[in-house]
Image: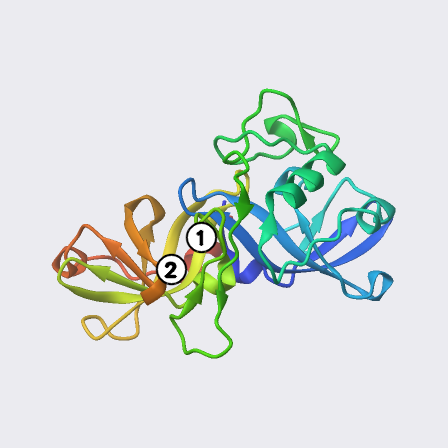
Amino acid sequence: MLHSTDNLIGFTMGAIDGEIGEVKDFYFDDQTWNIRYLIVETGNWLFGRKVLLSPVALEAPHWDARTFPVNLTKDQIKHSPDIDTDRPVSHQQETDLHNYYSWPINTGAGVGFMTSGMVGGVIAPGIPFADSISDEVHHHKEDSGAGTGNIQHPTGNPHLRSFKDFKGYIIYATDGELGEIKDFLLDGSTWHISSLVVETGDWYPGKKILIPANKIQKIEDEHSAIYLDQSVTEFKDIVEFDYDQLKDQSN
């Protein structure tokens, strides 16, 4: 079943022994288009600290209750490596995180839940997850003294991105602007991003359409721009996307 990434912001994270906090953002890989981490803001029990949790730590989500259970204790999370999610995450920090939780480092397709190799909240050996960890996790961050589009690029992996930072990027066809990214649709069983929700420009005012993630040809962060190898004309007959379509999946 497909889910809106924007709608997942605010989901409650539940440990074995109590509530952890809320989902505030996601890191995803723009080559595999898999979600790599959930950024979770903890409650008062951990002074609002933000922690990174891999989808491999999740048990079956409770979509209607807007809750993500994890097979971890609050004490485990409390003593996990303290990583500042507002700064680039170093290779050593990410390695420490994976070693601490015994999360897999090797990659591949998206991650499944209980029916796809989950063993006690950790994916079983031989089940692929996401891209291998690079020298540093790349976190896009706007220059505090500059306007939109002037993005700092710390040394590291340019393919690991924050969902919130990626929203607002402009998609260009070969012959003009197509629209602005507003959301992602992801598969709730694999955590793979299938499509980008794009709000169209003047050629199709005020509408939303879906662009398959695998159609993205190029990303230019300095201009907050994404390029397709298709013309605007090719989208003239595209069916408008309606979020009610996601509700219809369960009917």
Q: What residue lies at 19% left-to-right and 50% top-to-bottom?
A: 229
Q: What amino acid is found at the position of numbered circle 2 in the picture?
A: Val
Residue 104 position (above or below residue 228): above
Residue 22 at x, y percent in the picture: 70, 61
Mark pair 1, 2: CA separation = 7 Å
Residue contact at pointers 1 and 2, CB within 8 angstroms: yes
Residue 193 at x, y percent in the picture: 44, 47
Q: Secondary structure at mark 1?
A: strand
- Tell me the residue that label 2 is attached to: 197
Q: What residue lies at 41% left-to-right and 78% top-to-bottom?
A: 147
Q: Earlier in the sequence, mark 1 or mark 2?
A: 1
* Furthest residue in direction top, as rendered: 126
- Tell me the residue that label 1 is attached to: 185
Q: Secondary structure at mark 2?
A: strand
Q: What amino acid is found at the position of numbered circle 1 in the picture?
A: Leu
Confirm whether residue 182 shows in the render.
yes
Residue nearest the observer in this picture, 97 or 164 = 97
Residue 230 position (above or below residue 134): below
Locate residue 231 relative to residue 184 in the image: left or right: left
Residue nearest the observer in this picture, 191 or 32 = 32
